[in-house]
Amino acid sequence: MARTLDDVLDGLPSERGARVEARADEIHQEYLTLKKLRAHMELTQTALARTMGVAQATIAQLEQRNDIRVSTLRKYVEALGGTLSITVDMPGQRPVPLTGLGDRHLADGDDDPEQEVTASPDPRSGPPPMGG
């Protein structure tokens, strides 16, 4: 008799089973996120594909991936009429917006990996301290 997925998951140690289920949930949420975003904009896969200049099947594949290039995600979001921004939140630091990701021209110009990363001033935090 064939084993079902539930049989296999039930046979795993509880910690590993929990990790497998958590990752499956993450993948499912990532899939739903792009699909829901497109649906919220009231676009079909075909209409979005036409805007991006790709086949409808390409959009279907993008919406099922659990890993996507930033440049591809940027094109997808822009085809929906939006803009993509990525911000890093570090403990005890102001949010740092990342730029140049997925933009080959900007990324190629970043030739100094030792350059210090600084955040753009947050207009809500007032002027920078004097004498710094």
Image (cartoon, rainbow, N blue to C red):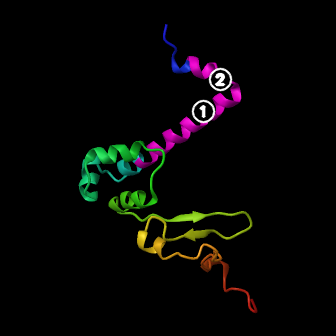
Q: Residue furthest top?
A: 1
Q: Which mark is residue 102?
A: none
Determine crowd level at label 1: few under 14, some 14-19, many 20+ residues with C-alpha closer than 10 A: some
According to the image, label 2 marks what residue? 12
Q: Is residue 60 left or right of residue 108?
A: left
> Where is 60 relative to 104, above or below?
above
- The residue shown at (69%, 24%) is 13
The amino acid at mark 1 is: Val
Q: Is residue 130 left or right of residue 124?
A: right
Q: Which residues are magenta?
A: 7-34
Marked residue nearer the N-terminal end (1 or 2): 2
Residue 86 point in image, percent of width and height: 53, 64
Residue 124 point in image, percent of width and height: 63, 77
> Where is 89 relative to 131, above or below?
above
> Where is 90 relative to 49, above or below?
below
Q: Does the CB distance between marks 1 and 2 fall below 8 Å?
A: yes
Specify the quadrant that holds the C terminus. bottom right
Q: Is residue 22 magenta?
A: yes
The amino acid at mark 2 is: Leu
Residue 115 in which image quadrant: bottom right
Residue 74 point in image, percent of width and height: 41, 61
Q: What separation in Å lies between label 1 and label 2 (alpha carbons)?
A: 10 Å
Judged by its main secondary structure, the magenta piece is helix
Residue 99 point in image, percent of width and height: 51, 71
Label 2 sits on a secondary structure element that is loop
Between 72 and 45, the one nearer to me in the picture: 72
Label 1 sits on a secondary structure element that is helix
According to the image, label 1 marks what residue? 20
- The residue shown at (35%, 53%) is 41
Between 118 and 131, the one nearer to me in the picture: 118
Residue 114 in which image quadrant: bottom right
- The residue shown at (42%, 49%) is 34
